[in-house]
Image: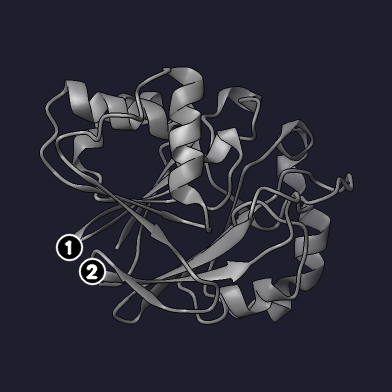
Amino acid sequence: MRVTFLGTGDSFGSGGRFQACILLEHPGGRILLDCGASSLIAMRRLGIDPGTIDVVLVSHFHGDHFGGLPFMILDGQFSHRSRPLTIAGPPGVQERVRAAMEGLYPGSSSTPPPYGIRYVELAVGLATSVEGCEVTAVLVDHSPGAEGRGYRVSRGDTVVAYSGDTAWTESLVELASGAALFICEANFFEKRVPFHMTYRTLEAQRERLQCARILLTHVGPEMLARAGESAIEIAGDGMVVDLGA
């Protein structure tokens, strides 16, 4: 599996980074972990055709994580996309995406695109087969109403875990267990803000996270300013990681 970090920034593009968007590629298809509002730009900058994406996994309903979907859906329509698209996420994902489309382009959700979209609601704790991978959703601690989820994406013996946005919660131990790569938000270095992770908290819990590697993402100004103090790797836009088959 190949992991390409398309967007590793916070909501506000700190450090010139794109919003949350991570591409997982395997022989059976292409999966996006989140699709923030800037994701089409990020994909095109790296020469990735949005029409080749098979699945988007939405971690929660904040614009910097799913706000790019209306643009991606309409781009597929105007570029004559033929590949079906699966959008999977927390309960209500179809209604949330359609509402976002109506907010940005009134009337756009009333006509289904010709290439076909399938919406899948992922039940917490239940492994679901999605385009050649098994996806398991885990509850995390993020803003009320956002329906925050972390994901384990498994193909064969390779597991990629993704925290989405969250404060520290014990479910992260389960989420990261046995993962070849745990992609974890670290919006702040040590400043405590509700519903978000600090590097200092993650550092204190590192030994409990039984994963091979951690990469930090969703980094904000404080984290960027103190990046040299971090003993855990920080992902950057365009970074590529190759994992086992």
Residue 164 is drawn in which quadrant? bottom right
Residue 169 visible in the shown view: yes
For residue 6, the mark is none
Left or right of residue 168, residue 36 in this image: left
> Is the Cβ of the residue at disc 1 closer than 8 Å to that at disc 2?
yes
For residue 132, the mark is 2
Residue 115 versus residue 79 in the image, above or below: below
In terms of secondary structure, where does tag 2 sit? loop
Name the residue carrying label 1. Answer: 28
User: From the image, which quarter does the C terminus lie in?
Assistant: bottom left
Q: Residue at x 51, y 22 (%)?
A: 103
- Disc 1 packing (10 Å; few <14; some 14–19; many ≥20): few
Q: Residue at x 57, y 22 (%)?
A: 16
Left or right of residue 68, residue 186 in this image: right
| Foreground of the two, 75 or 192 | 75
Alpha carbon distance from label 1 to label 2: 6 Å
Left or right of residue 114, residue 43 in this image: right
| Foreground of the two, 228 or 119 | 119
Q: Residue at x 34, y 82 (%)?
A: 157
Residue 173 is drawn in which quadrant? bottom right
Residue 52 versus residue 164 in the image, above or below: above
Residue 180 versus residue 168 in the image, above or below: below
Q: Which x, y percent locates residue 204?
A: 82, 68
Residue 23 versus residue 175 in the image, above or below: above
Q: Between disc 1 and disc 2, whose residue precedes? A: 1
The residue sitting at the top extreme is 105
In terms of secondary structure, where does tag 1 sit? loop
Q: Label 2 is placed on what type of residue? A: Gly
